[in-house]
Image (tube, rainbow, N blue to C red):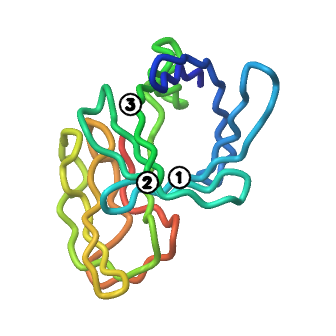
Amino acid sequence: MKLLVTVGDREVELVAKPSGDGRLTVVFPDGRTHVVDAQAVPGGVHVLVDGKSLDLAVGGPSDARQVALGSHRLETRVDVDRGLRGGRDTAGGRAAADVRAPMPGRVVGVRVQAGDTVEVGTPLVVIEAMKMENEIRAPRAGRIRNVAVVEGASVESRAVLVTFE
């Protein structure tokens, strides 16, 4: 998919190619490529870029996020190519999107079921990890196709929790 990334007043068009294991290969206009794995964590995003770890604090409205890396703060915006968004599945509809566990833990709450329609930010699943409860929220609006976990189940990092239609 094509992404137009704006950081401050600089725009860069990138191509992101899913690798099938939840990671993306990101291609810059000059041909440089980076393998990226991002996990939502409370208060931000944990990102691995070519095996290097970054913790980003993220806040603000979804169209103009404030991102902090250490003491550096930037306003960012990411626009997905409208013609490519969502892809297509074999039935001709939108491709399914998986919501994955950001860390290993135990499922202590399931807030949705198959068939539910949710908005961005709707609580989906609660995972207890290192004595903390982490509420996993909907990354987009849509209808829930499948809930792959039940309360009390142990999950590994990157395990599928919920699938959108």
Question: Mark 1: which amino acid?
Answer: Ala
Instruction: Point out the frontmost of discs 1 and 3.
Output: 3
Cα distance between the residues tagged 1 and 3:
19 Å
Q: Residues within 10 Å of mark 2 (few under 14, many from 20)?
A: some
| Image position of 100 with respect to 31: above or below | below
Number of on-image labels? 3
Question: Mark 3: which amino acid?
Answer: Glu
Q: How crowded is mark 1: few (under 14 residues within 10 Å), some or many (20 or more)?
A: some
Q: Residue at x 36, y 56 (%)?
A: 162
Which label number is shown at residue 38? 1
Q: In terms of secondary structure, where does tag 2 sit?
A: strand
Labels 2 and 3: the sequence-earlier one = 2
Mark 3 = which residue?
75
User: In the image, is 149 to the left or to the right of 51?
Assistant: left
| Image position of 88 with respect to 11: above or below | below
Q: Spot the residue most to the right.
A: 31
Q: In terms of secondary structure, where does tag 1 sit?
A: strand
Cα distance between the residues tagged 2 and 3:
15 Å
Instruction: Point out the frontmost of discs 2 and 3.
Output: 3
Pointers 1 and 2 in contact (C-beta within 8 Å): yes
| Image position of 88 with respect to 47: above or below | above
Q: In terms of secondary structure, where does tag 3 sit?
A: strand
Which label number is shown at residue 45? 2
Q: Residue at x 34, y 37 (%)?
A: 66
Q: Which residue is drawn at 45% across and 26% down?
A: 78
